[in-house]
Amino acid sequence: MTAGDILRSAVSNTFRSKVRTALTVVAIFIGAFTLTLTSAIGAGVSDYIDKQIGAIGGDDLLTVSPAAETAAADDGPKEYDPDGAAMQGSFTLLSEADIETIRATDGIDKVEPAAMLAPDFIQYDGGTKFELTVNPMIGMADADLAAGRQLEDGSGSREVLLPSSYLEPMGFADEQAALDRTVSIAVTDYAGTQHTVDAVVAGVQNDSLFGDGAGFNEELRTEMDALQKTGMPAGVPSGYITSVAYLSTDISADELDGIKSDLADQGFTALTVADQIGAIQTVINGIIGVLNAFAVIALVAAGFGIVNTLLMSVQERTREIGLMKAMGMGGGKIFALFSFEAIFIGFLGSALGAGVAIGLGTAISSVLSNTVLSALPGLNIMLFTPASVAVIIGVVMLIAFLAGTLPARRAARQNPIDALRYE
């Protein structure tokens, strides 16, 4: 009997007891279905986070802030030092000297201090005034655009990226209608005088996972910061809460660690975007891992169903096994026959489970993207990839094979004389 004959015989024998096989396949189906969905959720969320990281610079940028001094729990509160670093509330500020120190660090090409801007409002064409939040990171790196272009520093003109949620309230029909329009942004200085600055809408950005807000180019940031500080009394601490360092191109992971270490030795904390959201990814991966564990438990339980199904099949076909051995079929081929039956059952359950999960999950993901998750454009909560589906089917077939080894071994070790006498 050739390998092809064994495979065809295994497939045919699988359907001898249709009800028993169907129940076993259903158990595998449930596990494969669940594992495919949970894996797709993990892949979808991870893909969205990766896109967001890439859109705001990824590992090409470092957020550099003063290193926080933490005291042990038993040390009590830290004594106030009037001669210490500049403070604003509970924040240690970066001075101009600190910015120069960061700029002089090997591996860093450019440093942009992130001024804390607090505009009063934004207005278009004399219409309604709306409060505006500025995200200092947007404008220092590429944003996730719905339309338009990235901000350009050094162009000589003041440019702004508008959040997509501002379009309709401000009177724009769509993203294209807002491009290259002039908007007015107001800010109040220390003396209480309100100043208005005009800026051109360079683009419209999608809502981001890492915070909403408008983006200003260097010219607009500089002018808004200068107006905001107009009339600042002498002695008021001045500085920056954080800064963004642009790394040299082709920085390796070891070189990046070296830059972080150098900055730490100088009293700064340097983090990439990936570092800052590491905790979020850890939580997400942990949740997906727990869900996957439940799916694997269901598959292991289904494996016992395969053991039971094949053991009963071996018992029912004892005389048949004896006849095959009497006709010269070796124990290895009989082992292969029952192993193929187990693998085929695993393939049926996993293929059906993965197929239904893909169809149902794609529909659910589409609905969620247009309803509940519409505020996060580009997020597909379930992402199915051929590679991951193939791995799941392969893993289930492996579990099925391992579950079938006991019945297959028992069948292979049957004594042909005793088997032929079996009633």
Image (cartoon, rainbow, N blue to C red):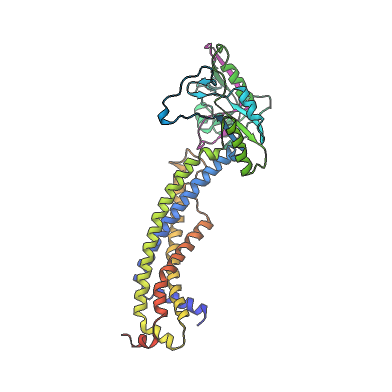
Residue at 62 percent across and 32 percent down: it is: 245
Residue 209 magenta: yes
| Residue 350 shows up from this direction | yes
* Image coords of residue 119 (percent x, y): 53, 21
* Image coords of residue 22 (percent x, y): 37, 68
Residue at 51 percent across and 29 percent down: it is: 68
Which residue ends up furthest to the right in the rendered image? 155
Identify whether 352 is placed above or below 268. Answer: below
Residue 71 magenta: no
Q: Quadrant of the C terminus?
A: bottom left
407 left or right of 192 in image: left
41 left or right of 181 in image: left
Q: In which quadrant of the rendered view does residue 232 lie?
A: top right
Image mark count: 0
The magenta stretch spans which residues? 189-217
* Image coords of residue 272 (percent x, y): 57, 37
Q: Quick one: 100 or 385, which is closer to the camera?
A: 100
